Image (cartoon, helix red, strand yellow):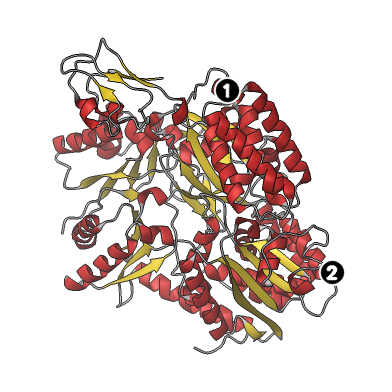
């Protein structure tokens, strides 16, 4: 059997490919062939290392040497020096920007890794349908420690000291929430897990429930111990069938093992968990609406106070936390508050899971420490913008959030900085937009979503958002006027100030944020009736350049509505009254004669 | 299964499971098995992870190769689904992306049978709570 004694891993991620990593691989293979070493050393093209800024990356095994910014011309030197003579090529090693020291051996060193997995620690690692695999990874140890060795107050203090804040979007300190609920006096209290993940493009909670359901159950039991509840409820949307199935399996296994139910671990503590299904209404992610929905009532929010911590499910004190918040709890207990608080920024501790989507190369589920910059997320972990286009903005916080532009690329991401920048953390959807995305259309898209999801209880949200949407439609249809932009702003402010719950109070955010950051695009739509990104169909105008047109009839034959006419070998012509702006002629023309304006 | 009755019981079970996993990883065990984890969250399944998993099970069985194929949750590499993690006893686990049937067969023929790596490895791009 052939046994290679050395492997050369060349990064074949999109970013590195753009800087000739395939050529680097070929050069390695050729050079090794010259030395007759191709049977002993294997060259492999890999996926992204997540360190694209310093790409192309070459890693050599087994000695774990990590070369950065390698060019095809460097290959000969690496082979001659490193492979043949065993001397590392110093100038290509990574230099620590602070200490200026070179780092040659990446073994056990995570200097190039921007992600830390805490909430996702077991996702993709254990079989979620096997409780023993979870137990083997410290599972239920935190619950055991809390029940046997700590008082509820001690546990709450640990959570408070860790600085953990709610991962559902608001960022309320979790320890404080637990403390308030624990102080409410009642015979019956409840722990609720909010798994009603509704933001478009967000799937953090689903991934955790599908990959590591026990971590959530364990944390709910810990929470129950702290606040004095013996009953937990997971409110999960029915559109997540696999997450529900795995959660059910997990609950049954935990019951069989005596980790849920009566007298857990012989400590006399009782706790059990049930599942409640949501029908997928976005507003039910709001905790009061969620509680009403669980009670069998309409999923509509009510005014706070009273907060659920005082009067929640069935009128009893209820602690509502999000899935990702819960998933962090066992680690905080096991590794200590100080460890957790050492990660992140001053006011936002730990990590955050983001669903990275949109015009980005490495679409994925990532977990990064708070305080990382947008640039690191997009260009290192995300591997840059698709097709080498230009970055325009990132939409965070879903329909309640806003856009972060180029000027925020180097802002450390945490709860407070995002709010200061006119967006919000939200549950963690991160949609990357490039220069071909029209910001007015984006604002309209999110508003359409809130329009659908508004429960209709309060007037500003029900009617105000409808009117906002009408104005946006008018603008993207090319009928907007300058005064509309002022109307947008004024109406948005009124909706924000007067809506009943978080949905309405935040729904104009995408409009306001795009107005603030991309006013020129709005202006172009209403004054010169142009969509700068070329997205708004109504504002586009196709025509044929008579000079370039050869009269090949290709466009004429492919036009689905017969809007193109002309004689063979004579310039063709588009009838604007018939044109539906489908763009087929543009794609079909071989002579670049179709113009778009 | 007996109920776990105390924290001591739990710790005992934990160390039992851990040593079982360690034996499997180090390969100093008669069962000495190759282990493949297939990332099977909803999105992975939508990209064909179930087909990949079934194919792996059938093909390994067909070729008489002893291996454990299990499911796991999301590995986070949405751009490269379906993804699998392959552990040859005594070696570091390796993650592969875009594993369709063709790729799966290539991995069996080359990596599992000849111990050669195959193009398309996804390097681990995150640190874990164990080493942070």
- Chain containing mark 2: A
Residue A98 seen by the camera: no
| Disc number for residue A36 | none
Residue A7 position within the rendered picture, expressed as x and y whole percent measured from the top left: 28, 47
Which of A149/A463 is in front? A463
On screen, residue A183 versus residue A428, left or right, reads right
Instruction: Give left or right: position of A307 versus A537.
Output: right
- Front residue of A298/A12: it is A298
Helix, strand or loop at disc 2?
Answer: helix
Horizontal and vertical percent for residue A228? 77, 75
- Quarter of the figure with residue A175: bottom right
Residue A89 picture quarter:
top left
Q: Is residue A111 above or below residue A321?
A: above
What residue is pinned by disc 2?
Answer: A183
Residue under label 1: A526
The tag earlier along the polypeptide, 2 or 1, is: 2
Task: Locate residue A3, reporting x and y percent.
Answer: 20, 55
Task: Locate residue A147, reporting x and y percent.
Answer: 70, 77
Q: How many residues crowd around disc 2 within 10 Å: few (fewer than 14), some, or many (20 or more)?
A: few
Residue at the (32%, 40%) spot, across then down? A12
What distance separates the C-alpha of mark 2 from that of mark 1? 56 Å
Task: State the residue at coordinates (80%, 69%).
Answer: A182
Residue at image position (66%, 51%) is A169
| Mark 1 closeness class: few <14, some 14–19, many ≥20 residues within 10 Å | many
Label 2 or label 1, whichever lies nearer to me, is 1
Near-viewer residue (A68 or A218): A218
The answer to whether residue A512 is left or right of residue A19 is: right
SS of the residue at dot 1? Answer: helix
Question: Would you place residue A290 above or below residue A84 in this image?
Answer: below
């Amino acid at each position: 059997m052939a046994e290679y004694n050395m492997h050369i891993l060349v990064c074949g991620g999109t970013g590195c490919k753009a800087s000739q990593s395939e050529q680097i691989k070929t050069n390695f293979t050729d050079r090794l062939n010259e030395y007759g070493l191709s049977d002993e050393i294997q060259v492999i093209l890999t996926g992204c290392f997540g360190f694209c800024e310093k790409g192309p990356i070459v890693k050599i095994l087994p000695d774990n040497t990590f070369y950065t910014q390698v060019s095809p011309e460097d290959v000969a030197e690496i082979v001659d020096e490193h492979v043949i003579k065993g001397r590392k090529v110093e100038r290509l090693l990574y230099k620590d920007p602070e200490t200026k020291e070179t780092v040659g051996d990446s073994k056990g060193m995570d200097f190039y890794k921007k992600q830390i997995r805490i909430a996702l620690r077991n996702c993709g690692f254990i079989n979620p349908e096997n409780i023993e695999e979870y137990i083997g990874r410290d599972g239920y140890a935190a619950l055991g420690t809390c029940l046997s060795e700590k008082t509820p107050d001690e546990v709450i203090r640990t959570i408070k000291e860790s600085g953990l804040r709610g991962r559902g979007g608001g960022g309320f300190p979790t320890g404080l929430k637990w403390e308030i609920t624990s102080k409410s006096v009642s015979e019956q209290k409840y722990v609720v897990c909010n798994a009603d993940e509704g933001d478009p493009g967000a799937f953090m909670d689903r991934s955790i429930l599908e990959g590591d359901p026990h971590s959530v159950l364990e944390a709910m039991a810990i929470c129950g111990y702290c606040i004095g509840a013996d009953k937990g409820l997971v409110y999960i949307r029915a559109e997540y069938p696999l997450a529900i199935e795995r959660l059910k399996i997990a609950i049954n296994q935990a019951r069989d093992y005596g980790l849920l139910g009566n007298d857990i671990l012989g400590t006399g503590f009782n706790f059990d968990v049930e599942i409640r299904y949501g029908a997928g209404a976005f507003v039910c992610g709001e905790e009061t609406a969620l509680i009403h929905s669980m009670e069998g009532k309409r999923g509509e929010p009510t005014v706070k106070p009273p907060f659920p911590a005082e009067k929640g499910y069935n009128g009893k004190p209820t602690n509502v936390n999000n899935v990702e918040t819960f998933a962090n709890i066992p680690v905080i207990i096991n590794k200590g508050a100080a460890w957790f608080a050492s990660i992140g920024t001053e006011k936002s501790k730990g990590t955050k899971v983001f669903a990275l989507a949109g015009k980005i190369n490495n679409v994925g589920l990532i977990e990064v420490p708070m305080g990382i910059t947008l640039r690191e997320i997009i260009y290192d972990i995300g591997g840059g913008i698709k097709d080498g286009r230009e970055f325009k903005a990132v939409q965070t916080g879903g329909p309640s959030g806003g856009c972060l532009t180029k000027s925020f690329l180097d802002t450390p991401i945490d709860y407070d900085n995002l709010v200061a920048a006119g967006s919000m953390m939200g549950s963690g959807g991160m949609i990357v937009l490039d220069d071909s995305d029209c910001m007015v259309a984006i604002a309209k898209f999110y508003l359409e979503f809130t329009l659908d999801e508004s429960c209709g209880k309060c007037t500003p949200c029900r009617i105000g958002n409808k009117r906002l949407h009408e104005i946006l439609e008018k603008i993207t249809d090319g009928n907007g006027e300058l005064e509309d932009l002022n109307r947008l702003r004024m109406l948005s402010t009124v909706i924000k100030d007067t809506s009943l719950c978080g949905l309405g109070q935040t729904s104009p955010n995408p409009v306001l944020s795009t107005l603030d950051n991309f006013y020129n695009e709005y202006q172009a739509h209403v004054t010169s009736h142009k969509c700068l990104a070329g997205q708004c169909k109504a504002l586009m105008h196709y025509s044929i350049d008579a000079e370039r047109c050869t009269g090949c009839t290709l466009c004429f034959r492919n036009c689905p509505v017969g809007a193109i006419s002309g004689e063979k070998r004579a310039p063709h012509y588009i009838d604007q009254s018939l044109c539906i702006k489908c763009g087929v002629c543009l794609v079909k023309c071989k002579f670049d004669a179709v113009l778009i304006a | 299964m007996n109920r776990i009755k105390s924290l001591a019981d739990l710790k005992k079970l934990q160390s039992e499971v851990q040593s079982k996993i360690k034996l499997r990883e180090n390969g100093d065990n008669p069962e000495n098995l190759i282990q493949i984890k297939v990332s099977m969250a909803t999105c992975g399944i939508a990209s064909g992870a179930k087909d990949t998993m079934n194919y792996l099970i059938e093909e390994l069985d067909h070729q008489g190769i002893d291996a454990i194929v299990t499911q796991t949750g999301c590995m986070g590499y949405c751009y490269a689904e379906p993804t699998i993690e392959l552990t040859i006893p005594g070696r570091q686990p390796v993650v592969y992306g875009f594993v369709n049937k063709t790729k799966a067969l290539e991995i069996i023929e080359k990596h599992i049978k000849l111990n050669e790596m195959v193009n398309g490895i996804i390097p681990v791009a995150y640190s874990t709570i164990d080493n942070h």
